Image (spheres, rainbow, N blue to C red):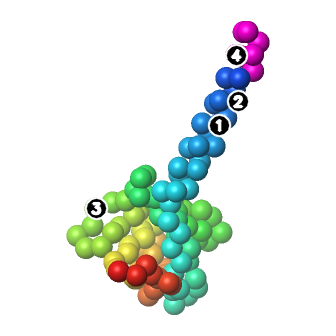
Amino acid sequence: MKKILLAFVPLMLSGCSYYNQFVEQMNTDTLNYQCDEKPLTVHLNNTRQQVDFIYDNQQRVLQQGISASGTRYTDGIYVFWSKGDSATVYKRDRIVLNNCQLQNPKQR
């Protein structure tokens, strides 16, 4: 009986891992923007209050910060700021992606 239990516990734990990944994907929206410079794909996770995207060939993960208007995410170097269907990306207060327009926005 103990051998069966020892074999079954790792199987149950791996199932929990897959379930957590599934839930994480369900809480993540993929947003496609067309910016002046190039397209930008942003993964928005409302549960974690963060966004991630690829810029300069590296994945950037930014946490939601304080914003007077719109929604702002930052890692201290990069800022992703969105309001409505538009967004801007900054690097150290310099705009690096401008006039980003959400493609195929949800119908309101």
Q: Main secondary structure of the magenta part?
A: helix
Q: Secondary structure at mark 4?
A: helix
Residue 95 occupies quadrant = bottom left
Instruction: Pick the quarter of the image with the N terminus.
Output: top right
- Residue tagged 4: 5
Marks 3 and 4, how far apart at CA: 49 Å
Q: Secondary structure at mark 2?
A: helix
Q: What are the residue bounds of the magenta stretch?
A: 1-7
Q: Please tell me whether residue 6 belongs to the stretch shown in magenta.
A: yes
- Residue tagged 3: 66
Q: Are marks 1 and 3 in contact (CB under 8 Å)?
A: no
Give the residue type at disc 3. Ile
Residue 75 in view of the camera = no
Give the residue type at disc 2. Leu
Of the numbered discs 4 and 2, the one sitting upstream in the chain is 4
Marks 4 and 1, how far apart at CA: 15 Å
Q: Who is closer to the viewer here, 76 or 46?
A: 46
